[in-house]
Image: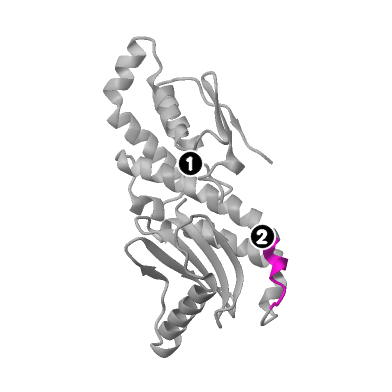
Amino acid sequence: MIIREFLIIYESGTILFHRKYQTGNSTDIILRSGLISALYNYATEVEEDSIDILRMSKVSLFFKKQEQPLLFVFFIESDVNPLICEEEINLLIEQFFKKFPEVIWKREIVDLTTFYSFNEIADNILLALGKKVDLLVFLIDDGLLTEEEYLQEDLSSLGRKVGMRSIEKYHNSFKESLGKGENFVLALIDRLISQLNGDNIKREDIDYLIECDHCFFQICQKDQCFFEEFLHTILFFFRLTEPTVNRIT
């Protein structure tokens, strides 16, 4: 899990919400939240400077502050660029204020059990984020995408780009396999889909069911789908069967 921990604290350091996804750091969370708050307040108030990312050897702290007096802190694996996670993190914060609007005008909330119901929402978003990053790492390592492209381009454009690069990279293999009557395209798509553990994108014979609202690349941008464009680009190029696309409403 690329998100080790997720904290919501007041400027004073008081914990409002805490969710931990990895074991390892046994330091008391109350002590850590106080230190984190002090560090953030020192940077922003004493030095009059902003602090968004604090990078360390094993973990990076990603700070988000959208409503006074709350500070959202995400503990992210150090080899992952926190900016890759920003859309999901913004969605998480949006969902928090939607579910608990009262925290905007209440300075301190004593009964923290109020926020236990947010566990499921946090898990759904952050666990899906982990799978999305797994897929991104696979695409980047395979030379089909760059981190900069992901940060700068929309999902549909990325799907088309990865599709065309797959054709260029594996063109000879495509031709050889198709000449033998084997469909290398499906094998390649299976390989990509396997990076998502097959949870929400399933193979059905030679067609593919794409549940766009549940696609891990789709969680924040409902009008675009990475996989739909990726599949269409490759299958159209080789004049193969068009995938079945089922948009969930």
Percent x, y of residue 40? 45, 79
Amino acid type of the residue tagged 1 in the rendering: Phe
The residue lying at 47 percent from left, 83 percent from top is 41
Question: Which type of secondary structure does the marked residue at label 1 adopt?
Answer: helix
Q: In which quarter of the image is residue 165?
A: top left
- Which one is nearer the viewer's eye here, 92 or 113? 113
Q: Which amino acid does label 2 sit on?
A: Phe
- The answer to whether 105 is drawn above or below residue 195 in the figure is below
Identify the residue at the far top of this view.
Answer: 180
**Which secondary structure is most common in the magenta stretch?**
helix
- Residue 47: name its quadrant: bottom left
**Residue that appears at 31% across and 38% down:** 142
Residue under the image location 36 percent in, 41 percent down? 139
* Label pair 1/2, CB-CB below 8 angstroms: no
Residue 46, percent across and down? 41, 90
- Residue that lies at the very extreme toward the bottom in this rendered image: 46
- Asked if residue 145 lies left or right of residue 157, the reply is left
Is disc 1 surrounded by few (<14), some (14 to 19) or many (20+) residues within 10 Å? many
In the image, 226: left or right of 57? right
Asked if the magenta segment contains residue 200, the reply would be no
Q: Which residue is identified by label 2?
A: 118
- Magenta region: 109-116
* Residue marked by disc 1: 226
Q: How far apart are marks 1 and 2 (CA)?
A: 28 Å
Taking 12 as reference, is 71 above or below it? above
Please give left or right for residue 94 compared with residue 63 in the image.
right
